[in-house]
Image (tube, coloured by chain):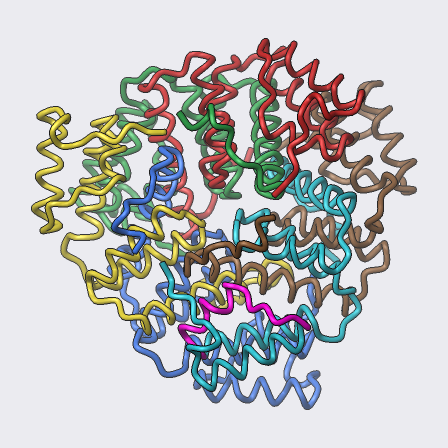
Chain colours: A yellow, B blue, C brown, D cyan, E red, F green
Amino acid sequence: MTNLIEYKDASVEVRKIYDDIRAIRQTEYINNFWKALANHPPTLQRTWDTLKEVMAGPGEIDPLMRELIYIAVSVTNGCEYCIASHTAAARAKGMTDQVFSELMAITGIANMTNRLANGYQIPIDEQFKS
Amino acid sequence: MTNLIEYKDASVEVRKIYDDIRAIRQTEYINNFWKALANHPPTLQRTWDTLKEVMAGPGEIDPLMRELIYIAVSVTNGCEYCIASHTAAARAKGMTDQVFSELMAITGIANMTNRLANGYQIPIDEQFKS
Amino acid sequence: MTNLIEYKDASVEVRKIYDDIRAIRQTEYINNFWKALANHPPTLQRTWDTLKEVMAGPGEIDPLMRELIYIAVSVTNGCEYCIASHTAAARAKGMTDQVFSELMAITGIANMTNRLANGYQIPIDEQFKS
Amino acid sequence: MTNLIEYKDASVEVRKIYDDIRAIRQTEYINNFWKALANHPPTLQRTWDTLKEVMAGPGEIDPLMRELIYIAVSVTNGCEYCIASHTAAARAKGMTDQVFSELMAITGIANMTNRLANGYQIPIDEQFKS
Amino acid sequence: MTNLIEYKDASVEVRKIYDDIRAIRQTEYINNFWKALANHPPTLQRTWDTLKEVMAGPGEIDPLMRELIYIAVSVTNGCEYCIASHTAAARAKGMTDQVFSELMAITGIANMTNRLANGYQIPIDEQFKS
Amino acid sequence: MTNLIEYKDASVEVRKIYDDIRAIRQTEYINNFWKALANHPPTLQRTWDTLKEVMAGPGEIDPLMRELIYIAVSVTNGCEYCIASHTAAARAKGMTDQVFSELMAITGIANMTNRLANGYQIPIDEQFKS
């Protein structure tokens, strides 16, 4: 089992990142994902910088929709941790049961039709190539 | 290679579905996916009914966002046909280059962090379980 | 591009395996998969022995059904080569268009429901654990 | 955790679907998958209709073989819930330990050879394209 | 749940394989993977022979690096059992925390860039085709 | 099809990254992956910084081995572009045919045993949990 590094046991370098996570997310809680990555500070730093920029930085896709896209990927890959943590994050950003169910329906049929397209070996329409 | 069934060669049953696709999508063009599924009318009927309801029916997630979620899944699965056809569909619904690039960034990091969570065997936080 | 090793250019060791493939499959044709694996004779030998035993050896699942299972996996993984080659193999063993379409329908919904189960984080029923 | 909706707490609409599941499956037991989908009746309805038609409707592939195909997909995707529930369903339809083991062997080698084909970048044989 | 076959309950045929596993791995411990496969001796035999040859036989990739490759695949597929067992195996062969973290970083970005390549539908450079 | 941005058409910002890619990789050639990402400079910057650090920065896993791990992931995911480009990169770093074949063998059996572990629903051994 991966060692989870608590704030009190963290190096100055890691604490600084934890502080930034807390500030950006506006919560005292540091979740296990970050406590695990803290075992390798360069990975923690790089992953947090990327996530902060992509999920919380400026952009045209609104923050809740970003979470929905994230969940769709995590559900497709079957990542239990990510499904649980990002479903919680999406709910905190306003995801209703209705939106969650629509998300699941879309994710489900995309996974189905992806395989129908694979299996029937469907050639790409010329007009989709340009 | 799967036989693609053109409108002129289609049965009455299949033509009726093609007509509905054209009406809902407001285009004369029937893409290869449907022409391939037409080899098995029950699959064509069921798949179209499901897609129509989930992607074009009433709901809280707006139609462009549904396409983005669909693309995120297709990119994760590596379905070339679906990526090409739904990227075209999303552009037709207003997806800009900027939105597409944000979508790719989110899809990319979700695939990355899914594996970090798997590999570090991170236990799900208690508060994400309730 | 991987070098494809033709019979005339093959070593005695590889020719012996090619001869066995021809005998078991009752066809002169050696498909590209084997010609590629022939670049590494131990992999060719091991893979052929395994495939021969699992796909062509004695067993309770009949040979056509084994091909269907194989296709379902290949379609799920999106392996173009394997979909093309095993669809051809299944047709040679009697797969009709109807059976192929049923196979695609099952493969499609399994991929869909797999994601619904993931996303809804459904706990396994006690009675399925025993 | 997803709320599981019991029969006694279900709406008339959901109860009607539960009744149909019980009738088709000839068992009083409603498994967690359906109790979770019941949180969104349109998804419950659509998924059950599809599953009933594809897995329990008329067709050339016999019901046990349909379950084997379903399991092969679920094992490939690593869906724990689906593996557990459909292994139970297949056993109820007559799957022996021998058949299960053959299924695992086929699923395993298909996953292996899919990657060998990917990695060696094997071109599709001309005769598999027609 | 799969029945795990202990040495004392195993057939002569299975015990012989268990003995070989113990000899090659230089440990008395037989892990659950083998005890599960022992339910189908031909699968146990074939899988062990393959693993022994590929993971423990002569070769240019050193044994620890083979384990790292194995873990990268298992993490990508999200196979919990394989991640746990091969992480333990790699540690026994000398994998440090630093090496594990580098492995996770590589596995993570490969999964990310795989999707960027899919999504941007990037054509393969001519010079990578020869 | 994604627009590929050539050096001569690139902004100053993108040219600076292209220059860094050329310097680190010691080649004039910029491959299509970067020319595609250049459509969104922040993604180009972030992805290159990450790749440079993880694949070309200091570390205990040697550069060729990093490429092998990268290929194993790409083959598992079936990313054609990544397989082609990183196989070329690995060959440039000294990957022989023998090493490539060993890599394919390991990747293949890991994909196989991942599914055997999934399908047999094997519980994780206590000693792999600590």
> At 22% from the left edge and 43% from the top edge, which residue is drawn?
A31
Residue F59 image-quadrant placement: top left
Q: Point out the image quarter for the C terminus of chain E.
A: top right
> At 7% from the left edge and 46% from the top edge, which residue is drawn?
A23
Q: Looking at the image, which is closer to me, D7 or F35?
A: D7
Q: Is D30 inside the magenta-drawn segment?
A: yes
Q: Is D21 situated left or right of C13 in this image?
A: left
Residue C53 seen anywhere in this rendered image of the structure = yes
Q: Is D100 situated left or right of A75 in this image?
A: right
Q: Position of residue D58 (x, y in %)?
A: 75, 75
Q: Is D13 situated left or right of C50 in this image?
A: left
Count the marks: 0
Q: Position of residue B55 (x, y in %)?
A: 42, 75
Q: Point out the image quarter for the N terminus of chain E.
A: top right
Q: Note whether B6 is above or below B125 in the view shown.
A: below
Q: Looking at the image, which is closer to me, B43 or F66?
A: B43
Magenta segment boundaries in residue numbering: D26-41
Residue C40 seen anywhere in this rendered image of the structure = no
Q: Is D102 inside the magenta-drawn segment?
A: no
Q: Looking at the image, which is closer to me, B23 or A21?
A: A21
Q: Position of residue F87 (x, y in %)?
A: 50, 30
Residue A48 image-quadrant placement: top left
> At 86% from the left edge and 59% from the top edge, which residue is drawn?
C94
> At 17% from the left edge and 42% from the top edge, which residue is drawn?
A30
Q: Position of residue A127 (x, y in %)?
A: 48, 69
